[in-house]
Image (cartoon, rainbow, N blue to C red):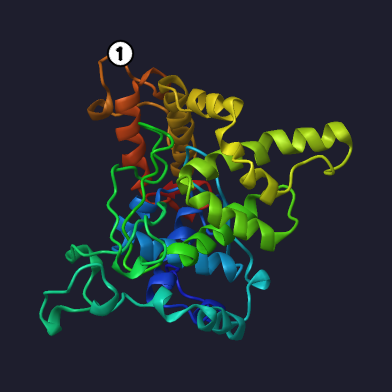
Amino acid sequence: MKKLSFITDRLEQQMLSAAEHRVYCHILNRSRSGESTHTEAISTTAKTCMLNQHTVRNAISLLTKAKMIRVEFRPGQTNKITPTSPKDWLTPEEVITLKEAATPSNRGQGTPSNRSTPNTSTPSNRGTSPLLNEDRGPLLNEAPKDTKNTKNTSLSSNDDETEGDCQGDIFSGSDEQIEEQKTGNELWDFEFETEFWPKAFKKVSVGKARESYRAARKKASRKKIFLAWQLVNDTDFPAKAEEDGSKAYVPMPSTWLNQERWEDEGIVARLEEANSPEAVAKNTKVLIGHELARLNANCVVPERFRGAPMQQTVSQLDLASAEKYLEFLRLKPTPKPLEEGSYVAA
């Protein structure tokens, strides 16, 4: 009899919401049940799961805290997500505690009283998908202009950056509008706990670092700070610690933020170089290679994705064609083995 996919009792008892359960199953499928990694853009995951992008972000945040997945942040690229073994998961009771610790405003879609403009919809339309409402809350990655009156503050995005997009101004900070009313310190603490602090090479004085991050976010966008922070923690700080034999001379996170080190000339120059068309094209082709490996496919490019007749392999593609081909590959499901050594598309 043909084997069918099924949900284990352990996952069924994990007390996940429908959205969290859907996102986890999608990540598990794209990572070959944990044998590989999930590198899909948030926008693509949201489209596949038919969810709002911020709902996907919240689900990934909860799954990370529940130790069901590990997230590796990568500058200028999509994040790398790896499912963990069920033996490492938090218990269902601990997952419930995590959810109860969240403030009500983080879990609901808000009420007309805390939106930036009056809700003119009829009562029957309230609470519907935020994609249908024009009066949304502040952007995920931009600081509110007035943190003292955040309930009546509405911010608009100036860019259309998508997750993993390396085009345009690397510091412009595309920040999606979100359904929940996270603003001011609440929003910045969320960024600090899920992105900034996990990336710190030297984890000391978390309280001071959190306060410094709040102050820094009033001066610069989340993306500008995070890209610089990820760069120094991936390269500069480990190299300095190895040279000096310890982490003693690596700056504390609060010191780095207070000195506005994201504006250092060397860091800015390196980030701009990494965002050059040549670097973007190279990174895009590397991501295509990962997707081809996931799909067990060869590097011959289908004709409809070739910018010119001569562009027959991935290495010959121009940037625009490579980006279209990459998006196409990301939408394809991971092949499932029917028999040993043979794969077909799911």
Point out residue 187 in the picture as x, y percentages from the top left corner: 46, 63
Q: Is residue 147 left or right of residue 227?
A: left
**Residue 180 occupies quadrant:** bottom left
Residue 328: x percent and y percent?
31, 40
311 sits left or right of 342 in the view: left
Q: Is residue 36 left or right of residue 279?
A: right
Regarding residue 25, the answer to whether it shows in the image is no
Percent from the top left, x then y, of residue 99? 51, 80
Q: Nearer the viewer, residue 227 or 281?
A: 227
In the current view of this chain or complex, which residue is farthest to the top? 310
Q: Secondary structure at mark 1?
A: loop
Q: Is residue 120 visible from the viewing direction of this image? A: yes
40 lies above or below 244: below
Residue displayed at 54% across by 84% down = 96
* Quarter that holds the C terminus: bottom left
Q: Residue at x 52, y 76 (%)?
A: 11
Which residue does the image show at 44% across and 20% down from the upper left? 278
Q: Which residue is mark 1?
A: 310
Is residue 225 shown above or below 2? above
- Residue 133, located in which quarter of the rendered image? bottom left
- Between 332 and 220, which is closer to the camera in this rendering? 220
| Neighbourhood count class around disc 1 (C-alpha, 10 Å): few under 14, some 14–19, many 20 upward | few
